[in-house]
Image (tube, grey):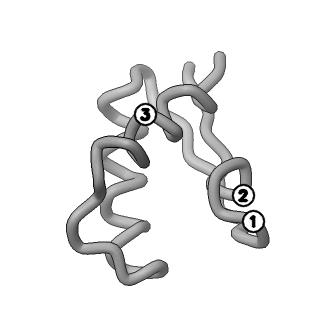
Amino acid sequence: MKVFACGDVVPGCGRTFSAVDEDGILTQVADHAARDHGLTDVPPALVEQVRSHIHA
């Protein structure tokens, strides 16, 4: 199981995500970024930041 805490990238955000793989996390995070942070286009640099903070 993989886990990501949005607050690791966006200070003050308390959302956390879990999925069996990174793709599952990234799908959830993209939806969250659009709904809660207003990011409809997630830049590649941000995707890399998220990837670097995903852990088992």
Q: What residue is rendered at 56% in x and 24% in y?
A: 2
Q: Residues within 10 Å of mark 2 (few under 14, many from 20)?
A: few
Q: Position of residue 6 (x, y in %)?
A: 62, 55
Q: Residues within 10 Å of mark 1 (few under 14, many from 20)?
A: few
SS for tag 3? helix
Q: Identify the residue under disc 3.
A: 48
Q: Identify the residue under disc 1.
A: 11
Is residue 8 or residue 44 the one in the foreground?
44
Q: What residue is rendered at 38% in x and 43% in y?
A: 45
Q: Position of residue 26 (x, y in %)?
A: 36, 41
Vertical arrangement, residue 9 with respect to residue 49, above or below: below
Vertical arrangement, residue 5 with respect to residue 36, above or below: above
**Identity of the amino acid at label 1?**
Pro
Mark sitting earlier along the chain (1/3): 1
16 horizontally vs 46: left or right: right
Q: Are marks 2 and 1 in contact (CB under 8 Å)?
A: yes
Q: Position of residue 34 (x, y in %)?
A: 33, 74
Q: Which mark is residue 7?
A: 2
Q: Are marks 1 and 3 in contact (CB under 8 Å)?
A: no
14 horizontally vs 48: left or right: right
Q: Position of residue 38 (x, y in %)?
A: 37, 83
